[in-house]
């Protein structure tokens, strides 16, 4: 599972907005949820995605740390994680998470390929379990028909 309980509506809203061509709203809704969902997956896999400091305070691992986590890489695969890194945290290719969070992204940019691809990548992540089930159930025959 990728969506934590209580966060379903964010993903529904983000997906519907993207299907309707409103990638500005889709990105604003979905991009913060990606980090939270990766943290949720790490917890499901048995790892606490935070650090306890000597003074007793606790700090959550950031998006970059989550994307570098071997459990997360194993859960989603190198390709998906590489794309998320390039789009969301890489300073050269995207840094979309930081740019969006601090309001640096002009409105017209949300209709450009990086934002549309970010939305599509979330759709891909959400549909992956269904695709794996379909492949396991119907196997090679379904590949030949597509």
Image (cartoon, rainbow, N blue to C red):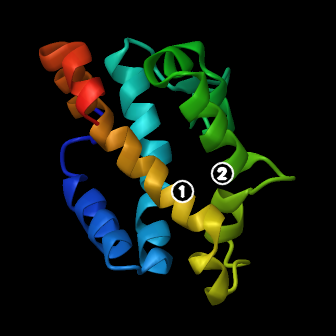
Give how far across and how far down residue 72 sits, in percent: 51, 22
Image-quadrant location for residue 41? top left
Q: Foreground: 106 or 98?
A: 106
Disc 1/disc 2 C-alpha distance (Å): 8 Å
The quadrant of the picture occupied by the C terminus is top left
Q: Which residue is mark 2?
A: 88
Q: Is residue 30 left or right of residue 112?
A: left
Query: Which residue: 20% across, 19% down?
Result: 141
Q: What label does residue 133 carry, if any?
A: none
Task: Tell me, yes or no, if residue 57 can be seen here.
Answer: no
* 26 up-or-down from 69: above or below: below
Q: Foreground: 131 or 74?
A: 131
* 8 up-or-down from 44: above or below: below
Q: Secondary structure at mark 2?
A: helix
Give how far across and how far down residue 130 sits, in percent: 21, 32
Q: Secondary structure at mark 1?
A: helix
Q: Are marks 1 and 2 in contact (CB under 8 Å)?
A: yes
Q: Earlier in the sequence, mark 1 or mark 2?
A: 2
């Amino acid at each position: 599972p990728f969506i934590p309980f209580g966060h379903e509506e964010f993903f529904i809203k983000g997906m519907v907005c993207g299907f309707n061509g409103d990638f500005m709203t889709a990105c604003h809704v979905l991009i913060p949820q990606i980090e939270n969902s990766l943290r949720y997956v790490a917890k499901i896999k048995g790892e606490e995605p935070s650090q306890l400091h000597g003074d007793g305070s606790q700090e959550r691992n950031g998006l970059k740390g989550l994307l570098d986590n071997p459990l997360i890489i194993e859960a989603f695969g190198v390709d998906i994680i590489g794309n998320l890194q390039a789009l969301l945290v890489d300073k050269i290719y995207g840094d979309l998470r930081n740019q969006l969070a601090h309001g640096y992204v002009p409105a017209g940019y949300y209709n450009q390929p990086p934002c549309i691809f970010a939305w599509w990548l979330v759709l891909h992540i959400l549909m992956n379990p269904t695709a794996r089930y379909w492949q396991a159930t119907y196997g090679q025959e379904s590949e030949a028909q597509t």
